[in-house]
Amino acid sequence: MCADVTIRRAVPADAARLHELVNNSYRGSGNWTHEQDLVGGPRLTLQQAQQLLAAQHSAESSEHAHASVVLVAVLAAPAGGLETGTLVGCIEATTSDTNLAAPDEPPDGYLGLLAVDSRVGSLGIGRALVCEGEATCQSVFGSRAIVLYVLSVRHDIQQWYLRRGYCLSGLSVPAAPLISSISPDSRLLVDHAEFLVLRRALADKDAAPAQH
């Protein structure tokens, strides 16, 4: 784990900061992962953030199966002009709609909503969140592989994941319908873009039984 942060499960009280962080990362111009020139509209509305964390809290309280788990990174020491305890990163771990697992295997995990505050973007927090997200998919869903989507025009982000063991699956998903489904006000601003499906198999020795 990154020495500068503590990674924990998000709670409902994190909703406002989660909303701010995600939209600054995806729609602002100060973060290298931004999509400001590619996608218009909010990446995550406040209501969506509240509903996402409320559902997670409800599942944990009732011991029902999780639909998804949102993890957040919190500064363990001051950094980037930010105080200890500031929420500076997030990732969502769930199961994939594009399941490439064999019929007799658990569903592939899916990672999304990866965001890191640009003021601490050089501390390795993104890498730490991806690792924790993969581990969560293993422990909660029993996944043996992870799937994620990257816009075809974002070659730099594709390379970031390829360096971390992900491979192009050869599959793609039309970008415009998926973006519109995220939020009614979201829209694709460029032509001929699609989401490439990347996948990484997890080592068998690391696989863990699902814990709902």
Image (tube, grey):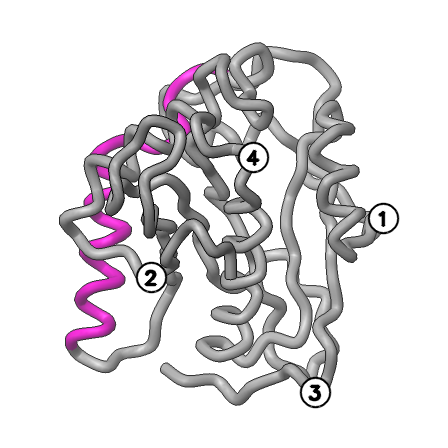
Image x and y of residue 110, in percent: 56, 58
At label 1, the amino acid type is: Gly
Name the N-terminal-most of marks 2 and 3. Answer: 2
Few, some or many C-alpha atoms within 10 Å of disc 2 (few <14, some 14-19, many ≥20)?
Answer: some
Numbered label attached to residue 125: none
| Predominant SS of the magenta segment | helix
Q: Quadrant of residue 117?
A: top left
Q: Residue at x 72, y 65 (%)?
A: 100
Looking at the rendered structure, the secondary structure element under dot 2 is strand
| CA neighbours of label 4 inside 10 A, class few (<14), some (14 to 19), many (20+) | few
- Work out how far the residue at label 3 is from the one at label 1, CA to CA, in angstroms: 26 Å
Amino acid type, callout 4:
Ser
Residue bearing the label numbered 1: 170
Tell me where residue 118 appears, x and y as whole percent: 46, 27
Q: Earlier in the sequence, mark 4 or mark 3?
A: 4
What residue did someone put label 2 on? 8
Residue 98 horizontal side relative to residue 122, left or right? right
The foreground one among 205 and 59 is: 205
